Image (cartoon, coloured by chain):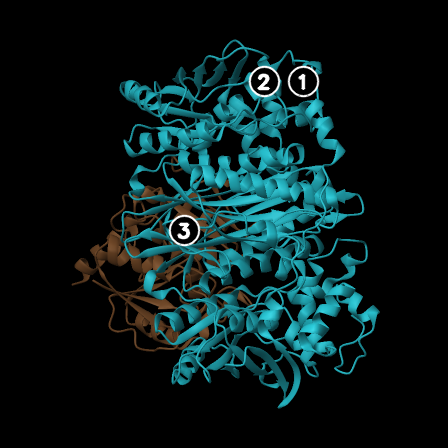
Amino acid sequence: MTSSITDVEITPKVVQEHGLKPDEYDRICKILGRKPNITELGLYSVMWSEHCGYKHSRALLKTLPTKGPKVLQGPGENAGIMDIGEGWAVAFKVESHNHPSAIEPYQGAATGVGGILRDIFTMGARPIASLNSLRFGPLADPKVKRLFSGVVRGIADYGNCMGIPTVAGEVVFDESYTENCLVNAMSVGLVRYEHIIKGRASGVGNPVIYIGATTGRDGIHGATFASTEITDESTEKRSAVQVADPFMEKLLMEATLELIHDDLLVGIQDMGAAGLTCSTCEMASRGGAGIEIDVAKVPQREKGMTPYEILLSESQERMLLVAKPDCEQKVHEILAKWDLHAATIGFVTDTGRMVVKENGKVVADVPADSLTEAPVYHPAKSEPDILKKHREFDEAAVPVPSHPQEVLEKLLSDPTLASKRWVYRQYDHMVRSNTLVRPGSDAAVIRVKGTPLGLAMTIDGLGSYCALDPYEGAKTVVAEAARNIACSGAEPIGMTDCLNFGSPEKPEVYYYFDRVIAGLGDACRAFHIPITGGNVSLYNENPSGAIDPTPIVGMIGLFTDVSTAVTQWFKDEGDLIYLLGDIGDSIGGSRYLQVVHGKKTGLCPKLNMEMEHKLHQALKAMADGRLLRSAHDCSDGGFAVALAESCVTGWTHEAKTHGAKVELPGQGRVDGRLFGEAQSRTIISCKPVLGAQIEALAGKFGVPCAKIGQVGGDALLIGGEINAPVARLADLFFTSIEKLMA
Amino acid sequence: MRFAVTVFPGSNCDHDCEYVIRDVMGQQVEMVWHKETDLRNPDCVVVPGGFSYGDYLRTGAIARFSPVMKSVADFAAKGGLVIGICNGFQILCEAGLLPGVLIRNKSLQFICKNIYIKVEQTDTPFTNACKPGQVLKIPIAHGEGNYFIDPEGLKKITGNGQVVVRYCDEKGNVTPQANPNGSLDGIAGVCNLRRNVFGLMPHPDRSGEDVLGSHDGQYIWKSILGAKVGAA
């Protein structure tokens, strides 16, 4: 941005610098009936960016299922909300902060956490847990280590200071993300029905109040920046990355919740991407109202800021609220208690327009809903040639290793599969004293104090599957998240997604996007799981290409009685071990094929959605009947890795490790049965006396169920193939990342 | 028994303390905002964990100047019971109510996990329900819990029996491997000379129930309840 004074001439070059296409500019002129001034151009630029306007994704997003009996708020607000009973509702959402984290990992990740937390407490909900999904290049690369440790520290420092436990997550290391790391942050909050509030303005004359941090020049055009590809130049765009102040946000959160609980507000919205612009026009548009503000009244950090800069600043930790009539004084009193800046900067009108003044002089005047209704594009799509090659890959040509045990050890040491203890120990995952199942199991479990209720939560992604087959891959991500929830004993009730892709303007990338949306939608319909909101992050590209198409799925599960929760590790000597589901023998798309044979190809596993759904129901019934000692999703790394994890992960909760002796079921290639990633499988254990009941329930739901062995001893024995001391497996699993980061 | 929990801007374990005292231990609890000076006649003051004032400047360095801290100091001077947990421990050290300081963890990383502590002094109002040498499983969650004191001070607090708990392994051995943050001599918590003020980095507020992984924190709360009976 070369200039920011109000009388800049709008040339085609200025329009282009604002990321707007010539026909978009024409559309703006048509809406206004005149040429926009530079401030107005800035407003359209950010609101019509992909990040805020979803112009390349909106048409497809509309096909996703968003309705269900428990949905109290679907997409379109700051976060989705679902009913969990007993007067409580859960608010949750995932959002990306990929571009800022790639430039400045610590601040980028920290502000990502701050942004998603604001989305939750803006709905009136108190955040109770955070999750995150991270993607980096291979961890051996020193540059990746710096990014990884910076991102983790940023998330930790922000969440820890806020006092919100970070309870679950995933980290994947893959070459596709070397230049474009992905940082997706999810937050979950609880709200009483009567405290749910929305981001809308209404009531002519009601005061519009600005609260929180002062406005500076940081982050101007962050949203536009997030909607372009990363180049060498953009690593110089540091001013578009904001600086985090979690202490300010903690005060803002407490003050906001107090204002909402005291029933002083009509509506409230956080200032995230596109700052004051977005909060003003979205609140007006949702409420079918207009808003008039005077930027001179906005608390400012720096002198001489122009209206353009004030409107587009993405300074963090700020909120905009509309107070009820005669409540303005009380609002100011509560804010003073928390030592927060507050200023009444405008009022609600009935004109439907967003009017911005500077000391009484109009500097922008546009229809509010024209900003929130970005153009909708239907980009061209074409199937990439590479998909055909993946389909034609000949598995039979891959040699079967003669020492499967070495393969198991290699997989357990692979940073993507190994324990993320190095990460989650930096996160306070216990604060608020509700974390019943801490990081290290398939899903985290949080209790709801004062009720028998509990929530299971997980976040998952399968970029490498989606790169091989976007439709099957996307279905499988949903299945895996739901399976993680089901393994913990809960019923999956709702989902949020973050869609990370390359440039939608490239037909190959858009093909992936289209197929992924189809897969997500079909799986959610099959499992009756509505999507209540999410985020799209496009343009994750760099000179060497786009990232793997990476939909990230955050899922919430409900326990009506949280004392039935199940964890993934073996509990006691002599317990019976069962495999639910069919073992399969394909190695296509597996982590094994990638790590051991260096091939990221083949057909990723086909998902039978009907069978998958039956499995979830069977697991829930077994947990409800308190039949399970453990249940663990059998997915990346396959059967052998899942068994090894059930042997060793009790460590995460200071429980003993256990050995196990099991047969290797099925027929076909040994490496496929040990390390292949066939879907709809779970490894469970139970007390010997409950075996018959387990078998009966599996039969009732039509889920294949094979008794494969027993818990016991100091080694993991699988058929005649593997005989590994558990202590060694535990050491490899828990310390691999720690050793690389030392 | 009546407890008062101080609330600073940035406190975030205040609700956990309130919950364990009221709902698990069945006692009365009042939350006292940092701008207040009236502690409302408690038997014990709890200074909770968190990031008071965002840990700006130095952990606990700003909180000690809060109006409520003057009242806490007066209360302690009269022999009232004061316990500081995590950031609360840091604040009590900064306020001069406890000896020593807490510096960055040796690893330079925040650490959240369950650890074990050995109770070395049981003749305090905070540990009288423990057996000598008892091992408690209890979580830590801090970035700056590395206890430090000058050699002279160390001699004093050791000699006076002010080192109440030390980090240990599951069996009670105080070893360098069991020390999570580099604390001098594995010191996890200390009391003042008069033994009515106690601070520790581990969280008895997060370990009051088996469903959370341990109920060993209850020994600390039960001790406080027992101390009241003893004093009456």
For the N terminus of chain A, the image quarter is bottom right
Q: Quadrant of residue B7?
A: bottom left
Disc 2 sits on a residue from what chain?
A
Residue found at x 55% / y 57%: A113
Q: Are marks 2 and 1 in contact (CB under 8 Å)?
A: yes
Residue A728 visible somewhere in the drawing: no
Report the mark closest to the observer, 2 or 1: 1
Question: What type is the residue that disc 3 sits on?
Answer: Pro
Question: What type is the residue that disc 2 sits on?
Answer: Gly
Q: Dot 3 surroundings within 10 Å: few (below 14), some, or many (20 or more)? A: many
The brown-coloured chain is labelled B
| A37 and A254: which is toward the camera | A37
x, y percentage for residue B131? 27, 43
Q: Same subunit under labels 2 and 1?
A: yes
Task: Find numbered disc 3 in the image and state the secondary structure of the residue it sits on.
Answer: loop
Counting residues from the start of the chain, the first of labels 2 and 1 encountered is 1
Disc 3 sits on a residue from what chain?
B
Q: On the picture, is A295 further left or further right than A564? A: right
Give how far apart the Cα atoms at labels 3 and 2 are.
46 Å
Q: Which residue is mark 3?
A: B202
Residue found at x 70% / y 64%: A240
Q: Same subunit under labels 3 and 2?
A: no
Q: Which residue is mark 2?
A: A672
Q: Which residue is mark 1?
A: A395
Q: Is residue B207 above or below residue A690?
A: below
Q: Is residue A427 above or below residue A209?
A: above
The cyan-coloured chain is labelled A
